[in-house]
């Protein structure tokens, strides 16, 4: 059984694949991508991915309000996936805000550089404080 952090990493990987495939114009099925990453079905993963993709425009709009240097589209796909997941958890789930932010920061530490990690932390922190 995977813990929540491992499941978030799977969500990030699937989102990354979706973003790359969409940009490349390659046909794909989201549920197949999810199944390739999971041994057993998981509602947290499936719901998160589908909701993030459904609300992608809203999530990106919100991110763009706080991204100082460049819009979401200019971030690499991994960073977009991490930030989208963090915003989704802050805005659309019961996940405690500190957990949502910390989990995104930990993913970023693993997959991004320090500057991006600080930026992700700052953006999520501002979104959290705005909606507190």
Image: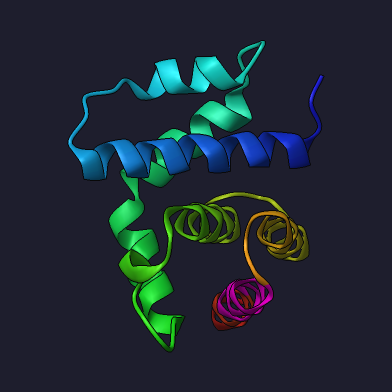
Quadrant position of residue 104? bottom right
Quadrant position of residue 60? bottom left
Q: Which segment did they paint magenta? A: 114-124
User: x%, y% of residue 16?
Assistant: 45, 43
User: x%, y% of residue 42?
Assistant: 63, 20
In-front residue for pair 110/128: 110
In-front residue for pair 21/9: 21
Where 34 falls versus 89 (above or below)? above
Residue 121 is covered by the magenta coloring: yes
Q: Is residue 29 left or right of residue 38?
A: left
| Residue at the spot 48% in from the left edge and 56% down from the top edge | 84
Query: Which secondary structure type mostly characterizes the magenta part of the structure?
Result: helix
Farthest left residue? 25
In-front residue for pair 73/88: 73
Quadrant position of residue 23? top left
Farthest top residue? 40
User: x%, y% of residue 40?
Assistant: 66, 11
| Residue at the spot 22% in from the left edge and 40% down from the top edge | 24
State which quarter of the image contains the C terminus: bottom right
User: x%, y% of residue 36?
Assistant: 53, 16
Q: How many marks?
A: 0
State which quarter of the image contains the N terminus: top right
| Residue at the spot 69% in from the left edge and 58% down from the top edge | 100
Where 105 falls versus 118 (above or below)? above
Say how the picture is coloured. Answer: rainbow
Q: Is residue 80 left or right of residue 2?
A: left
| Residue at the spot 58% in from the left edge and 79% down from the top edge | 119
Q: Is residue 28 left or right of residue 122?
A: left
Residue 111 is covered by the magenta coloring: no
């Amino acid at each position: 059984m995977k813990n929540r952090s491992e499941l978030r990493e799977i969500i990030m990987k699937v989102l990354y694949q979706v973003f790359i495939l969409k940009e490349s114009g390659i046909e794909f099925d989201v549920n197949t991508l999810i199944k390739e990453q999971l041994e057993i079905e998981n509602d947290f993963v499936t719901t998160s991915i589908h909701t993030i993709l459904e609300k992608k425009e809203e999530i990106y709009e919100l991110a763009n309000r706080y991204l100082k240097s460049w819009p979401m589209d200019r971030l690499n796909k991994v960073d977009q996936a991490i930030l989208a997941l963090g915003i989704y958890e802050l805005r659309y789930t019961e996940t405690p805000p500190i957990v949502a932010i910390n989990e995104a920061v930990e993913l970023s530490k693993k997959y991004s550089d320090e500057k991006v990690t600080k930026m992700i932390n700052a953006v999520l922190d501002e979104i959290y404080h705005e909606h507190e």
